[in-house]
Amino acid sequence: MIARALDYALTPTGRLKVGETKLPPIGGEKDTHAPSSPTTKHRASNPSFLPPAVNDAFELFFAFRGFGWDFGQGVHVPQEYRPLERGAFLKATWKIFFKYFLLLDFLEACMKLIPGVGDPHGGPIFLPLPPVQRYAVSTTIHIMTGTMLLAGFEAVYALTTLIGVGLIRQSPLLWPPFLDHPFSSDSLTIFWAKRWHQFLRRLFVIFGGYPGYWLGGLISKEVAKVAMVFGVFTASGLYHELSTYTMGRGFDKNITLFFVWHAVATLGERVWYKVTGRKVQGWIGLLWVYFCIMIVGQPCSESPFKLFLRLASPY
């Protein structure tokens, strides 16, 4: 909310809808939308029961990806696979909710069976075993953790979609899929810019990207672009770490370092392209993405499991 307040307050023209050139008076002229906007062209045919000004306020408050607004232009919109007729759309979304809720519940129950990790006091995912068994166990836990996160994301998003489309009467076009097949990504650039969810993109740009660009711009424009990438990923790392720091278990640098590493890796893909003229893609790119997520990411996923262990230990 602090990031939103900064973004809206420091924008001279105010936040405009796609197609608007100025802010309309409250209760005055109708909204003007560009007919080509994929998330707004059917808005008028599905009016909300809320007054327009209240509806706009809610959208600015909750529209994390900014669909239909100027700050959302350029954000990747995953291709919709559900029917857009309201009844069929809601039915398909209910199925998604139950599927991922059951998957999350099953994996959470399985996680509790793992010694140490599933204990209420927590524990490390790297168990004192021979190397092969040790990393087989840690990789399994890591994959289960990631799947639980994805299932949780999808279940909550499906539930809020049902509220937005079913209760508030918003267009299904405003609720495209949460993710876009992230593990079919054959480069980290594609993974973070398109395949992964874009809900926190603006937040990280405000808290990290813009300050990084400004600081780097004191040196040169090229340095500013690099600093902006580092700023975005650093803000992402701090966001994920500070959400658990408030629970009183201290600061764990592994989460932030994981995201900073991805700044290095994505910039490395740009350097590779400039040097060789070839993009990171294909099966080699797919292995690269899996290495960065599945192997490099393990200390990051271990951090939450060690939370209660730290709280219970005086050391």
Image (cartoon, grey):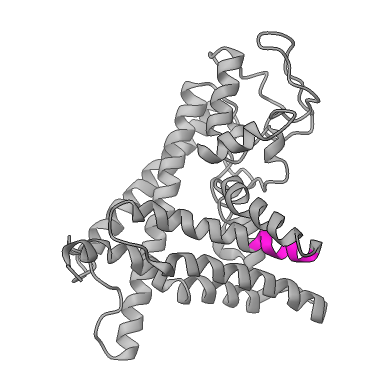
Residue 53 location, quadrant = top right
In the rendering, at what x and y percent does residue 149 appear? 40, 55
Q: Residue at x 33, y 51 (%)?
A: 246
Name the side, left or right, on which 19 lies relative to 147: right
Q: Quadrant of the C terminus?
A: bottom left
Which residue occupies the extreme top position in the image? 28
Q: Is 227 contained in the magenta span?
A: yes
Residue 242 vertical position relative to residue 265 in the rendered view, above or below: above
In the rendering, at what x and y percent does residue 148 appear? 37, 57
Residue 137 vertical position relative to residue 64 in the rendered view, above or below: below
Q: Residue at x 45, y 28 (%)?
A: 163
Q: Nearer the viewer, residue 217 or 15?
A: 217
Residue 132 vertical position relative to residue 10 in the rendered view, above or below: below
Whether residue 310 is visible to the viewer of this picture, yes or no, is yes
Per the rendered image, the range of residues in magenta is 222-229
Name the side, left or right, on which 35 lies relative to 211: right
In the rendering, at what x and y percent does residue 269 appear? 70, 73
User: What secondary structure do most residues of the magenta stretch adopt?
Assistant: helix
Whether residue 281 is visible to the viewer of this picture, yes or no, is no
